[in-house]
Amino acid sequence: MNQAKSIMHYPLMVVGTVAIDSVETPFGKRDSVFGGSASYFSYAASFFTPVELIAVVGEDFPKEYRKVLQERPIGLDHLITNSGKTFHWKGKYETDLNTAHTLDTQLNVLLDFKPKLKADREPEYLFLANIDPNLQLDVLNQVKRQKCRFIACDTMNFWITGKKPELEKVLKRVDMIVLNDGETRLLAHESNLFKAARKIQAMGPGTVIIKKGEHGALLFHGQQFFVLPAYPLEEVFDPTGAGDTFAGGVMGYLVKTNEISFENLKQALVYGAVVASFTVEAFGLDRLRNLQTADIENRRLEFRKLCHF
Ligand code: AMP
């Protein structure tokens, strides 16, 4: 199994956080949940394509969590362990499950992380998941742009507020950004989402995806525009990771189909929304760990019926 993994080709690479979260929702509270932007992203994308993960954890990172990633075609050669504690995020959701309130962010091992890509790695697709923009730049600088077909990124209020100039450098070098509505408004200094998306396109990425939680997502691709509702769920348990798994579904589908066009991006958004709808049905990665590719396809067909008019 390990041998098979070492010769596997990973067309998609992601850098982001691998975290230990503490999460509180109206339905319950959990400490030491396996989380992080890169964990959720890679787990979701792995239903479509092998994915290589670049991240750092501390000595406290449980072995079982590494095993969770090993359940999927996720390359772990660049998941390094440094001395110190794993990145820790503590968040709370009120009755409005669309908004995560950050109670605490402990960067820990992220502070001294210097990602170093092995020389033979030439990803065709790169996702810069939510992490310090300086680390996003470090990885960008090591990837051969001529060989890399498509680069996308994510970020959040923590970095938009704390590292705006660095983030602006990242934006100049990516093809697509995936943000939620609040982050979009904050980044663009603009309350209208259409105007905000246009402003962000002018900062670099020709494609902007705005996630609106239970209200769906918007796609801006050049001058073209598409709107998609969210898959309606009667029960949402824990919204953590919805955004990262949405991005994982979108990127995974783009890699699988290897086509960057408006029509294909629309399909990618549908897959993103479907995978995210599974994530929120349980705490952490619990639901995705019981997911089959057929479940994704069945829900996508249900979703299509619901949207058709
Ligand atoms: P989301 O998909 O937006 O719900 O992402 C949730 C994940 O983001 C959690 O598992 C956190 O560990 C991670 N996270 C929270 N804050 C940050 C941050 N400032 N930088 C990177 N990752 C973060």
Image (tube, rainbow, N blue to C red):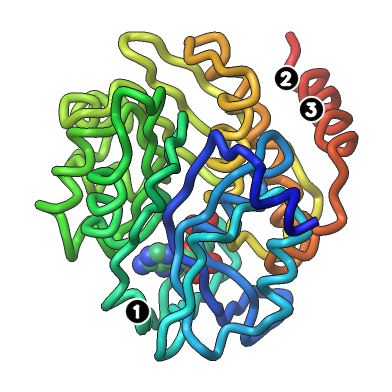
Q: Which residue is mark 3?
A: 300
Residue 95 in percent (x, y) is at 60, 67
Q: CA distance from mark 3 to mark 1?
A: 37 Å
Q: Give the number of the mark in front: 2 or 3.
A: 3
Residue 229 lies in quadrant: top right
Quarter of the figure with the N terminus: bottom right
Q: Is residue 93 above or below residue 187?
A: below
Q: CA distance from mark 2 to mark 3?
A: 11 Å
Residue 50 in percent (x, y) is at 65, 41
For ligand 1, tell me if the residue under mark 1 lies within 8 Å.
yes
Q: Say left or right for 204 vs 80.
A: left
Residue 206 in percent (x, y) is at 29, 21
Give the mark nearer the N terminus: 2 vs 3: 3
Front in this rendered view, residue 31 or 38: 38
Quarter of the figure with the C terminus: top right
Q: Which mark is residue 107?
A: 1
How many C-alpha atoms fall within 10 Å of the one at disc 2: few (<14), some, or many (≥20)? Answer: few
Image mark count: 3
Give me the residue at 88% from left, 38% from top.
295
Q: The disc labelled 2 sits on which kind of residue?
A: Cys
Q: Say left or right for 41 vs 207.
A: right
How many C-alpha atoms fall within 10 Å of the one at disc 1: few (<14), some, or many (≥20)? Answer: some
Which structural element holds mark 1? loop
Front in this rendered view, residue 84 or 264: 84
Q: Is residue 221 above or below residue 273?
A: above
